[in-house]
Image: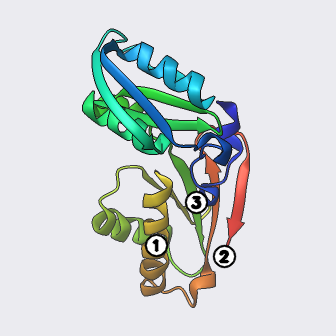
Amino acid sequence: LDSAAGRSAEAGPPTLKASLRKPVSLNFRDANLKAVFEALSRSTGINFVFDREVKPDIKVTLSIANLSIDDVLGVLTVTNQLERKVLNDNTVLIYPNTAAKQKDYLELTVKTFYLANAEAKAVFTMLKTVLKTKDLYADEKLNSLTIRDTAAAIALHCGSAQRVGAAAGCASARAVRSATKSTTGAATLGVTR
């Protein structure tokens, strides 16, 4: 799990090894969910980790032939109100598809924008209004803005921040520099212009 802290936001989420993505065929009638995932693990080599709130005794009826592992996991999770998250190249976390669990397992990234030709407080006010984000902080001493959100949302925010920063007086897109790091604070993941 700690390896996730070393990945950059640009690298994207982890994916399963290509060798584990072979087609799968399963046939179960009124089987326990845990038994289905154990069979899937034996046939694919994928490790499954379950959130403690996943009920292993849920009954599953499933007949699948030659589907990709992604499709099989999609069917199993959607039909049982579950969600999945790939943790590394051979491990998948299974958890209940609830708002609270989505929030618990959402990968967040922190990105800091250092402003050269605009005041952080002014840009902060504009971004707060335009982006409707809650996790935005302005540091007037460093003349910087820091945002915490998902990697996809930050990518959207980056373009908006640069456009708003330019509108607020930045001479060019280079006037807004940014640094990204994981929410664990383990390492700086990159500096972009």
As drawn, the label of residue 53 is none
- The residue labelled by disc 1 is 161
Q: From mark 1 to mark 3, how far is it between C-alphas?
A: 11 Å
Residue named by callout 2: 193
Q: Which residue is depicted at the point 44% across and 81% down?
A: 163
Mark 1 neighbour class, 10 Å CA radius: few under 14, some 14 to 19, many 20 or more: many
Q: Position of residue 44 (x, y in %)?
A: 59, 31
Q: Residues within 10 Å of mark 3 (few under 14, many from 20)?
A: many
Secondary structure, mark 3, is strand
Residue name at image x 48 percent, y 45 percent: 68
Left or right, 124 with respect to 1, comes to left
Outermost residue, top direction? 57
- Residue that appears at 42% across and 36% down: 73
| Contact flag, marks 2 and 3 (Cβ < 8 Å) | no
Q: Is residue 70 left or right of residue 61?
A: right
Gap between marks 2 and 3, in whole Å? 12 Å
Task: Say which residue appears at 34% left-offset and 62% top-offset.
Answer: 128
**If you read the primary sequence from the N terminus, does the residue marked by circle 2 or circle 1 appear first?**
1
Q: Is residue 162 above or below residue 28?
A: below
Query: Between residues 35 and 185, which one lies in front from this camera angle?
Result: 35
Kindly state the secondary structure of the residue where label 1 is placed.
helix
Residue 97 position by quadrant = top left
Amino acid found under the numbered disc labelled 3: Thr
Q: Where does the C terminus fall, quadrant-wise?
A: bottom right
Q: Which residue is mark 3?
A: 112
Q: Secondary structure at mark 2?
A: loop
Find residue 105 and report its horizontal and vertical position in percent: 45, 34
Nearest to the eye among marks 2 and 3: give it: 2
Crowding near the residue tagged with mark 2, few <14, some 14–19, many ≥20 C-alpha atoms within 10 Å: few
Q: Amino acid at mark 1?
A: Ala
